[in-house]
């Protein structure tokens, strides 16, 4: 899961990005409106956390322009809590609206919710044969027993599970599992896939040669 | 009672009372006039009849010689010429037949008595009421007293050649004149009888009376009519008064209805001013402008409070996020240190913001008194420049001072705050290696302090808003500026009776001009 955070307060941006990374997300950051829009338009993020008050282009404007080309779930972050502002945010195309100061667990829950909704899932658990993926608890059960996965391995499983039945290309996986600062060595993905197959069974992830990976 | 507290009812009660008094006064006066008119008419009638009797009596009773009431005889006549009274008063008078109609048995017409000077009744008409019924004035005391003060009113020497009655004839015209002049003879009411008593020169008294029950009844009816008409007028008057009062007080009701809505919290309400010219219209206009000012002040306060809360949310969000992230798992000492430092920065920002908010609130409330001491504005400015120099050096900004001594009266610490704020802005929004110029000069009895920079300037659309609270052209919360500095500066300058203005050219720089009264 790759997230973009657009926030102009440096301390807030840094701690938010850190907390999200520790949750297993790949996080890109932008500290002003123009960079934010550039990133949002150029990359397929799984969700965007967008502050309203920004130097340069403000959050409303970014949302308006982004909605013309993308359906990326957007969670608006603002210090204004009047219902007028919330209505405006939701009407402009925001998927959810969180008022500062926010509680981190709540922010994460809302983030999971908008990602889930964008993948047309209604619950946090995805069952694939003997494997159960719990996106809220971020763990995987294999034959009702918890399986130890690294954060990156879990993200790989979760992403493929959310896009079950469709072929996910390597590029897409790179885009969604690694942020812009990570040097994505081409065989790193193969290593993760191979580790997951060892833990959840070789047939769990199917390789479509020349296309990508798929969970059927 | 509530009814008596209502202006509407009080007005109406007073109005009704006044109307009652006016109508009653008018009615009573009209009744009195009518009564007087009737009585004069009756008295005239009675005097006419009196004249008839008097003439008859005169013919048979010539006045005595040297009658004190007649005075001296005319000069061309000797007293001897007066026919002396030789005969005793006759027992009976024979009234001429044509007069009988006036004194017949019907009570509607007049009656009469003739009484001698010493009180014996000589004659009475057939229709006269029983003597016992009346205590007519045989005790002449009261009557004579009045009558003897003047000449006998109804007799006049008209023809000296007529000797048998001394040439004195009853003068009906004179009687009428006296009536008209409001001096009837001795007329009074006795029950329902109106009577006139007059003495003759010969000394006899004649009382002529009439039962005036029909006239009194008519008067009574007129009185009732007056009362009815008065009552109807009163009813119409009260109804009209109620309508007028309601109409006049209608704007008051609308004002009060609006005021109730406003006191309930809806400050956007205004009184509908239909008649702006009337006193209430003016009152409504004054109230409306007051409401508008209140509304604006409330809106400003609300905006201010909301902005303040908004400004505080971000640092709180920083602290909360930092703390929650740090506590998620075990961290290394440098990581904790970093978290604590971030929290400290956020807390410092809140501290500054809260300080500025409090200061602004005190300045708004006028609770921050300005000292009024003489000091050198240039010296204060120099101190500020020295204070700010490290920041300027850090950014490579050069400060150029033009500070001739200029003594003004005011609060040097507060004005130093203004100068420092302007200098800080000028340095922060300047280009690296830019210039800040600070100058003080005297102009038209005012001290002018200018701070100019060579920075990017302020965009035209931002110019009107630079003194607004929390307004920052860059919309960024991350700068050290909390958006209150210029608002505070403006409040301080205003408390000194001065003004602060901004002029800017995009790309060339900005100049703030502070104008302060010297004394």
Image: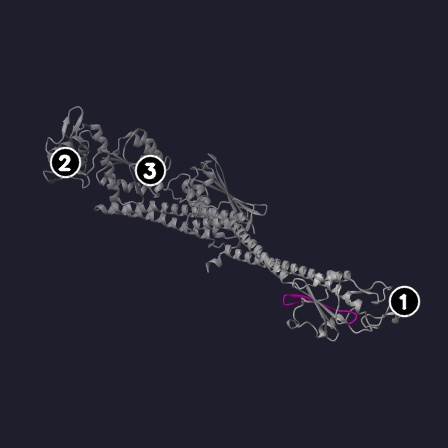
Q: Which mark is residue B181?
A: none
Front label number (2 vs 1): 1
Label 3, secondary structure: give it.
Answer: helix
* Neighbourhood count class around disc 3 (C-alpha, 10 Å): few under 14, some 14–19, many 20 upward: many
Q: Is residue B128 left or right of residue B328?
A: right
Predominant SS of the magenta segment: strand
Q: Position of residue B224 (x, y in %)?
A: 58, 58
Q: Secondary structure at mark 2?
A: strand
Q: Is residue B200 magenta?
A: yes
- Which residue is label 2 attached to? A127
Residue A150 at x, y percent in the picture: 16, 38
* Picture quarter with the N terminus of chain A: top left
Residue A215 belongs to the span the image colors magenta: no
Residues shaded magenta: B189-203
Count of labels shown? 3
Residue closest to the eye, A203 or B230? B230
- For numbered disc 1, what is the local secondary structure? loop
Residue annotated with mark 3: A89
Image location of residue B124, percent across then percent down? 70, 69
Task: Rate crowding at label 2 as few (under 14), some (14 to 19) or many (20 or more) other CA atoms within 10 Å.
Answer: few
Foreground of the two, B423 or B117: B117
Return the chain for callout 2: A
Q: Residue at x 14, y 36 (%)?
A: A127
B267 up-or-down from A169: above or below? below
Q: Which residue is mark 1?
A: B76
Q: Chain of mark 1?
A: B
Earlier along the polypeptide chain: callout 3 or callout 2? 3
Compared with residue B132, is residue B359 higher up or lower down, i.e. above or below?
above
- Looking at the rendered image, the quarter that the C terminus of chain A falls into is top left
């Amino acid at each position: 899961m790759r997230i973009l955070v657009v926030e102009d307060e440096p301390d807030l941006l840094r701690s938010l990005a850190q907390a999200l990374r520790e949750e297993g997300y790949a996080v890109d950051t932008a500290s002003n409106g123009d960079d934010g829009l550039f990133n949002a338009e150029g990359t397929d993020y799984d969700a965007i956390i967008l502050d309203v008050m920004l130097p340069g282009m403000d959050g409303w404007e970014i949302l308006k322009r982004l909605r013309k080309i993308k359906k990326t779930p957007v969670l608006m972050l603002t210090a204004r809590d009047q219902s007028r502002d919330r209505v405006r945010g939701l009407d402009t195309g925001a998927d959810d609206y969180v008022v500062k100061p926010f509680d981190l667990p709540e922010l994460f829950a809302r983030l999971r919710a908008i990602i889930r909704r964008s993948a047309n899932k209604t619950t946090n658990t995805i069952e694939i044969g003997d494997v159960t993926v719990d996106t809220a608890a971020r763990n995987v059960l294999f034959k009702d027993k918890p399986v130890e996965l690294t954060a990156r391995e879990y993200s790989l499983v979760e992403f493929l599970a959310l896009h079950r039945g469709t072929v996910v290309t390597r590029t897409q996986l790179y885009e969604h599992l690694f942020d812009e600062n990570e040097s994505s060595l081409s065989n790193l993905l193969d290593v993760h896939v191979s580790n997951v197959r060892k833990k959840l069974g070789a047939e769990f992830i199917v390789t479509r040669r020349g296309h990508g990976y798929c969970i059927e | 009672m509530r009814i008596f507290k209502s202006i509407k009812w009080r007005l109406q009660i007073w109005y009704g009372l006044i109307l009652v008094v006016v109508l009653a006064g008018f009615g009573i006066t009209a009744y009195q006039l009518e009564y007087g008119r009737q009585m004069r008419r009756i008295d005239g009638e009675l005097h006419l009849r009196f004249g008839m009797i008097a003439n008859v009596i005169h013919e048979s009773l010539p006045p005595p010689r040297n009658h004190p009431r007649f005075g001296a005889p005319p000069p061309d006549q000797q007293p001897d010429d007066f026919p002396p009274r030789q005969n005793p008063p006759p027992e009976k008078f024979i009234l001429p037949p044509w007069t009988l109609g006036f004194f017949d048995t019907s009570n509607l017409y007049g009656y009469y008595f003739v009484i001698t000077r010493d009180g014996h009744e000589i004659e009475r008409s057939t229709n006269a009421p029983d003597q016992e019924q009346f205590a007519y004035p045989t005790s002449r005391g009261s009557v004579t007293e009045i009558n003897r003060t003047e000449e006998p009113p109804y007799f006049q020497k008209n023809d000296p050649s007529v000797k048998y009655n001394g040439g004195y004839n009853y003068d009906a015209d004179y009687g009428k004149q006296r009536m008209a002049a409001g001096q009837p003879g001795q007329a009074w009411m006795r029950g329902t009888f109106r009577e006139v008593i007059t003495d003759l020169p010969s000394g006899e008294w004649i009382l002529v009376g009439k039962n005036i029950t029909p006239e009194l009844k008519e008067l009574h009816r007129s009185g009732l009519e007056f009362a009815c008409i008065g009552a109807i007028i009163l009813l119409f008057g009260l109804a009209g008064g109620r309508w007028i009062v309601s109409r006049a007080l209608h704007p008051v009701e609308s004002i009060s209805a609006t005021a109730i809505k406003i006191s309930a919290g809806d400050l956007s309400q205004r009184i509908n001013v239909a008649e702006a010219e009337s006193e209430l219209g003016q009152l409504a206009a004054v109230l409306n402008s007051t409401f508008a000012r209140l509304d604006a002040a409330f809106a400003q306060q609300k905006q201010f409070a909301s902005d303040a809360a908004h400004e505080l949310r971000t640092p709180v969000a920083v602290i909360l996020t930092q703390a929650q992230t740090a506590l998620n798992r075990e961290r290394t000492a440098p990581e904790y240190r970093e978290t604590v430092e971030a929290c400290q920065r956020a807390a410092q920002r809140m501290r500054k913001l809260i300080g500025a908010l409090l200061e602004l609130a005190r300045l708004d409330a006028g609770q921050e008194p300005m000292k009024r001491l003489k000091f050198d504005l240039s010296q204060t400015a120099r101190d500020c420049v020295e204070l700010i120099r490290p920041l300027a050096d850090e950014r490579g900004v050069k400060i150029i001072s033009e500070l001739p001594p200029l003594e003004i009266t005011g609060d040097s610490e507060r004005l130093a705050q203004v100068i420092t704020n302007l200098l800080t802005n000028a340095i922060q929004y300047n280009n690296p290696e830019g210039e800040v110029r600070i100058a003080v000069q005297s102009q038209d009895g005012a001290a002018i302090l200018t701070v100019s920079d060579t920075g990017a300037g302020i965009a035209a659309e931002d110019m009107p808003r630079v003194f607004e609270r929390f307004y920052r052209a860059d919309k960024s919360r991350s700068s050290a500026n909390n958006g209150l500095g210029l608002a505070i500066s403006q409040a301080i300058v205003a408390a000194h009776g001065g003004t602060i203005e901004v002029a800017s050219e995009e790309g060339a720089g900005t100049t703030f001009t502070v104008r302060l009264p010297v004394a």
